[in-house]
Image: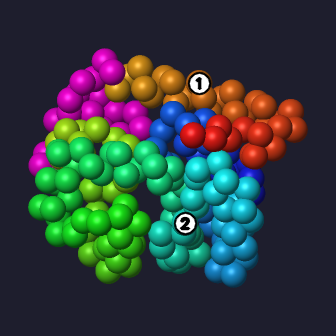
């Protein structure tokens, strides 16, 4: 996985304005992908970010970059807790929930749409997506919005601007380590 691809998909998390990002990445071999993830973690863990391959399938890895401290706050929200409990998650550390999410992804059944909670999406939008089967949303960007559309549009614009800025700085030679805000 190239650093440019990582910056392209994970800039809001690197900048500290988003809990997490998720993207699919093609790979030649699992060991090569694991090495890429290890190299990123060496740099990013000290800045408060962890990178995990959530799943390997058909030559693609589902890569999750997240801020454990922000994820912990997000998953402690009452609405998020209720939704995860309804979906069969047992609570404890956020890492335990991530392991359960990885198991759901590996099972190959219905895609676990509660994954939006792990990305920092508003619980009302994640719940709305699940209940409405992705229909009847107010607007769409990073996610489908069922709650506050104006706030979501502002957030989408902030994420786009952040990504543009980070990619431009990366293209000018700024390293991932320097792009990453310690939170």
Is residue 140 a member of the stretch shown in magenta?
A: yes
Residue drawn at point x = 44 percent, y = 28 percent = 156
Residue placed at 28% from the left, 38% from the top? Answer: 122
Q: Which residue is at the front of the view, 157 or 39?
A: 39
Q: Determine whether, in the image, residue 127 is placed left or right of residue 7.
A: left
Instruction: Please indicate, yes or no, whether residue 8 appears anywhere in the rendered image.
Output: no
Q: Determine which residue is flagged by label 1.
A: 161
Residue 11, quarter of the rendered image: top right
- Indicate whether 108 appears above or below 42: below
Tag 2 secondary structure? strand
Q: Residue at x 60, y 29 (%)?
A: 162
Q: Report crowding for label 2: few under 14, some 14 to 19, many 20 or more residues within 10 A (C-alpha).
A: some
State the mark number for residue 52.
Answer: 2
- The range drawn in magenta is 130-151
Question: Residue 90 lies in what quarter of the image?
Answer: bottom left
Label 1 crowding class (10 Å Cα cut-off): few <14, some 14-19, many 20+? some
State which mark lies toward you, 1 or 2.
2
Residue at (27% x, 33% y) in the render = 145
């Amino acid at each position: 996985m190239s650093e440019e691809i990582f910056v392209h998909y994970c800039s809001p998390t690197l900048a500290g304005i988003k809990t997490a990002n998720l993207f699919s990445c093609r790979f030649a071999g699992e060991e090569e992908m694991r090495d890429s993830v290890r190299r990123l973690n060496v740099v990013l863990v000290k800045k408060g970010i962890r990178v995990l391959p959530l799943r390997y399938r058909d030559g693609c890895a589902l890569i999750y970059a997240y801020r454990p401290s922000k994820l912990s706050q997000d998953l402690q929200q009452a609405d998020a807790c209720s939704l995860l409990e309804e979906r069969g998650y047992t609570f404890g550390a956020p890492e335990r929930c991530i392991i359960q999410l990885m198991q759901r992804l590996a099972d190959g059944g219905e895609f676990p749409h509660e994954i939006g909670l792990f990305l920092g999406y508003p619980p009302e939008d994640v719940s709305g997506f699940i209940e409405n089967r992705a229909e009847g949303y107010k607007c769409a960007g990073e996610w489908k919005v069922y709650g506050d559309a104006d706030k979501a549009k502002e957030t989408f614009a902030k994420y786009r601007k952040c990504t543009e800025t980070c990619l431009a700085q990366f293209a000018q030679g700024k390293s991932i380590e320097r792009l990453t805000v310690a939170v």
